[in-house]
């Protein structure tokens, strides 16, 4: 029997509205036995104590690209989910834009098998809204939901016209599933890129493309009562404003933001392929970035999502858009001035927020609150400890991150998911490293 006493931590549990200093947690073979103040140390238990450390429910990432099957040179499920565990995540949502895409029952089952075989943490699989993500023919949403799809998304593309988007929203809504969209109006992207129709050639991605897509999606949502819409990686002040108004109107809309859009600014979509900070949607201006923070803190934005997008190393002009970053989500956010004073809200957007986006379909993700006598699903982290993404510490196969070699604040010490310790920082927790 292995017993661990986590002593004098700050317990942050947004599911139960708990924010308490000086909590002890006793774990026995992965089960959380007791939570309280000044618990007695059992004779055979390992004592873990670290000033200023925090325990929260294990995080859920609602937007992750695992690249397998199809592009194993970019990322492996095993590597991405190990990086996720090291980032404090107990579950991740895999997007459908694999090669081939998850647009049939056959592909869905294959992904489920692969996720189960290789995932270090639970992978909740999304299915595509349309065949080949082309925006034309809808997938068999009903069969995919029955097989376990937690939601539907054509992420990477947004090719559906209004009529199809409404049909997907209606059918997914009837199944209790959320529809997550990559809000960039493709007609406007074609225009901005001098009429080029091939998405691979779109380098210019103006803010208007996002704002237009969000406007249209909100109108589609309004026309399909009972459905739920989720906006992925909102990046503009204008986009955030539309979400705020839609929520005030009572629409079932949720939104996410990525750590890179919260932390970095860029050319705002006006730079070409050589932009070293290139991602879709692009990094925007300082006033957009500030608007995202404000929206996150006030609750207009529900979740922080990694949009983990690992790629192989390449010269700047040939680099594919996106960042590999699931391991540093917490640190990227905590590195922001003032984020620590909103730690409760930050943790909420990594736990209860993403769970709310998934609705009842997220019930199979571990970590819906800290409760005694249940298998532990929790993240233990030190918000003040720094670490540096480097070949020694980095677990994803993709090293395409603007934070490479940069010291970051906020280190995950251990992650438990469903009663299993899925990550341990051996250097900082030598007491358990020998186990
Ligand atoms: Zn996307």
Image (tube, rainbow, N blue to C red):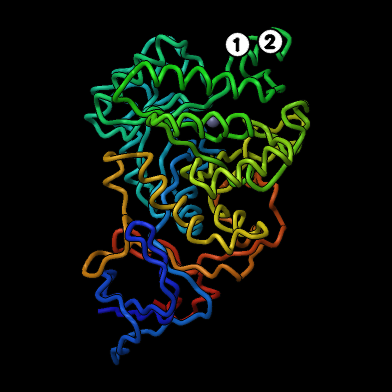
Q: Residue at x 27, y 46 (%)?
A: 363
Residue wearing tag 2? 191
Quadrant (top left/top right/bottom left/bottom right) for the N terminus: bottom left
The number of callouts visible is 2
The image shows residue 341 at horizontal and vertical percentages of: 58, 64
The image shows residue 372 at horizontal and vertical percentages of: 24, 70
Q: Which mark is residue 187?
A: 1
Can see residue 31?
yes
Q: Are marks 2 and 1 in contact (CB under 8 Å)?
A: yes
Can see residue 69?
no
State left or right for residue 81 relative to residue 224: right
Image region (quadrant) for ligand 1: top right
Q: Is mark 2 within 8 Å of ligand 1?
A: no
Q: Residue at x 39, y 24 (%)?
A: 128
The image shows residue 19 at horizontal and vertical percentages of: 41, 67
The image shows residue 339 at horizontal and vertical percentages of: 60, 58
Q: Residue at x 64, y 13 (%)?
A: 188
């Amino acid at each position: 029997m292995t017993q661990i006493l986590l002593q004098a931590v700050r317990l942050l549990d947004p599911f139960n509205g708990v924010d308490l200093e000086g909590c002890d947690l006793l774990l026995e073979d992965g089960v959380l036995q007791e939570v309280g103040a000044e618990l007695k140390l059992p004779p055979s238990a390992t004592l873990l104590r670290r000033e200023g450390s925090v325990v929260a429910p294990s995080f859920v990432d609602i937007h992750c690209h695992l690249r397998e099957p199809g592009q194993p040179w970019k990322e492996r499920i095993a590597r991405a989910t190990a990086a996720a565990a090291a980032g404090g995540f107990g579950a991740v949502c895999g997007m459908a834009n694999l090669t081939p895409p998850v647009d049939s029952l056959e592909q869905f089952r294959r992904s489920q098998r692969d996720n189960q075989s290789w995932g270090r943490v639970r992978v909740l699989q999304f299915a595509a809204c349309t065949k080949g993500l082309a925006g034309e023919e809808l997938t068999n949403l009903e069969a995919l939901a029955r097989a376990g799809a937690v939601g539907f998304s054509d992420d990477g593309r947004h090719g559906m016209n209004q009529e199809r988007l409404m049909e997907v929203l209606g059918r997914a809504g009837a199944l209790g599933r959320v529809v997550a969209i990559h809000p960039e109006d493709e007609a406007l992207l074609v225009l901005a890129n001098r009429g080029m129709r091939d998405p691979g050639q779109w380098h210019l991605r103006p803010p208007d493309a996002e704002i237009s897509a969000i406007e249209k999606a909100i109108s589609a949502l309004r026309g399909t009562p009972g459905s739920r819409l989720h906006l992925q990686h909102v990046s503009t002040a204008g986009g955030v404003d539309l979400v705020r108004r839609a929520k005030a109107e009572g629409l079932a809309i949720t939104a996410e933001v990525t750590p890179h859009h919260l932390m970095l600014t860029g050319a705002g979509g006006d730079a070409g392929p050589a932009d070293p900070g290139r991602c879709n949607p692009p990094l925007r201006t300082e006033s957009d970035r500030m608007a995202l923070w404000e929206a996150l803190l006030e609750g207009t934005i529900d979740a922080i999502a990694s949009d983990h997008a690992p790629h192989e190393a390449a010269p700047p002009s040939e680099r594919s858009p996106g960042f590999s970053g699931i391991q540093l989500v917490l640190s990227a956010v905590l590195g922001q001035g003032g984020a620590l004073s909103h730690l409760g809200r930050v943790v909420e957007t990594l736990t209860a927020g993403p769970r709310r986006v998934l609705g009842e379909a997220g019930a199979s993700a571990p970590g819906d609150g800290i409760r005694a006598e249940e298998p532990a699903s929790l993240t233990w982290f030190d918000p003040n400890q720094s670490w540096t993404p480097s070949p020694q510490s980095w677990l994803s196969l993709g090293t395409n991150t603007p934070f490479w070699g940069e010291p970051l604040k906020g280190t995950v010490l251990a992650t438990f998911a469903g009663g299993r310790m899925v990550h341990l920082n051996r250097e900082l927790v030598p007491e358990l490293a020998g186990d």
